[in-house]
Image (tube, rainbow, N blue to C red):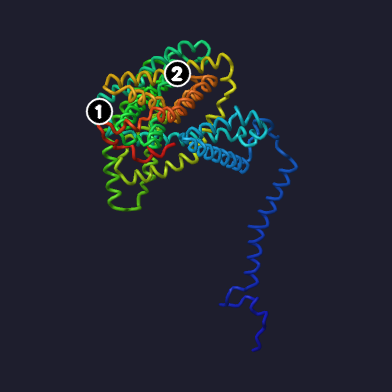
Amino acid sequence: MTHDPTSSLVNEPGGDPPRFHGAARALISYGLLVLVPLALALLLLRYGVDHPVKEITGATKAAEPADLVGQVLVAGAVVVAAAGLLGLAARAVGQSPVVGEILAGLLLGPSVFGALAPGVSKEVFPAAVTPIMNNLAQVGVVFFMFLIGLEMPLTMLRRLGGKVLSAGHAALAVPFLLGMLAALRLRDEYQPDGVHTGPFLLFVALSVSVTAFPVLARILADRGLIGTRLGAMGLAMAGVGDVTAWCALGVVVAEVRSDSPLGVLVAVAEVVAFTLLLWFAVRPALAHVLRVLESRHSGALPVGTLITFFVLICAVTTNVLGVHAIFGAFLAGVVMPRSSRTVRDFAHRTEGLALWLLLPFFFAAVGLQTRLQSVFSLSALGVLALVLLVAVAGKIGGTFAAARLAGEGNRESLGLGVMMNCRGLTELVVLNVGLSLGVIDSRLFAVLVVMTLVTTVATDPLLRLLRLDRLSQTPGGGLLPVEAPSQTQGTAGTRQP
């Protein structure tokens, strides 16, 4: 029988399915699942074009996601470049890089960039980008505070006992008292509406009492003093002052957020209980878990993720308890095992991200909120002079008296006072908290930012002028034996700008 080439298109009993029917099914499937949806999509597009929705105009119109991402990237590139360049310039003239980075933030704000090129400033920092920069800055501050807690010289503080504790608290208490008196003078003009007098007085007093432990560690390392008796003494006193200052800030925040004195006491008691829980229960548990994970060399559990989660959950907890999130991050650093290589590696990686990206955003956020023009009126210059006098005299005078009583010489005591007068980034963190809570207004914020910059810039030249390196190797009485500090060679202390 001759084979008919068309016979394969006809059904045959027991034969294969006809190719014609298979092709037809494919065409039908393509039409239903591809052409019909495409046609409906085109109709919907046509309907959307013919019947446009009401356009949102003015300041409420949201930027397109792609445009917003691009704007954030442009702003970030400008901020990082400015912070890096001015940080290098500051180092070239013998200053800590943080001085240049603070200055970069101020220059990018409305005081300089916004005043000289307002149109370009709005293009680089549009209104939609500022909240994103602020949020990124706050994340950076949280991890910066973790690094500060990690670098607190706990072993040194335990070894030194009451002498350095007394001197460190004197370096905080004297400027605190003078700051309180200055705040009483300023409250009629600078206390914001709706803010009680108590939180305002406490915050202004605290803001002139802070010492920047990480910035001081960097300056002492550059001057060759970090491993000397006098350098160890300065770091120990700064550590005592920082721990006490953060506790005081927690009380101020709790008072602002609470409606009654009882609420403040409850918030403080809850944070104290949380701190004790972390120290006595979580700290040894963390050390054990990290030892086990490191000994197994297992990648099953990402230890960096565990540490990140711990930092964030501590920050969330103190925020929920009515104290700022940075306090929880600081506590997370304090209780973290210092000897763990995993923790050191995590801190090193976190420090890079925080210092090179997130903290420049913080400096820019501070600069965008600072209007230096408000400082240059006659009355504001008088306030600035008063704040500088209180801040410098309180820190140097209180430290000098405490060191002299402890047996230090005049030059050493004066050098310690200059060390305690260093503020830097730690002070900006405190000021930013006060501004965000509404405890101070933008005018006083600008004055305190200028005070921070002046006192930070003055630290290194004054230490060089005193030539403390010639005295640092001379053993003698006082607060400390000749022994290098045990904690200051860690992750953040000597690398922090």
- Categorize mark 1 by other alpha carbons within 10 Å: few (<14), some (14-19), many (20+): some
Q: In terms of secondary structure, where does tag 1 sit?
A: loop
- Viewed as shown, does residue 119 lie left or right of 96? right
- Viewed as shown, does residue 44 lie left or right of 495? right
How far apart in space, not on screen, are marks 1 and 2 (Cα)? 37 Å
Q: Quadrant of the N terminus?
A: bottom right
Say whether residue 322 is visible. Answer: no
Q: Which residue is mark 1?
A: 476
Which residue shows up at 66% across the image and 32% down it? 117
Counting from the top left corner in percent of width and height, residue 384 is at: 51, 18
Disc number placed over residue 404 in the picture, else none:
none
Disc number placed over residue 204 in the picture, else none:
2
Q: Quadrant of the C terminus?
A: top left
Which residue shows up at 48% across the image and 41% down it? 356
The picture quadrant where one finds residue 26 is bottom right
As shown in the figure, which amino acid type bears the numbered disc 1? Gly
**Do the numbered discs 1 and 2 sit on residues whose CB atoms are within 8 Å?**
no
Q: Which is nearer the N-term, disc 1 or disc 2? A: 2
Say whether residue 101 is visible. Answer: yes
Counting from the top left corner in percent of width and height, residue 370 is at: 55, 26
Q: Residue furthest right?
A: 50
Counting from the top left corner in percent of width and height, residue 438 is at: 50, 21
As shown in the figure, which amino acid type bears the numbered disc 2? Val
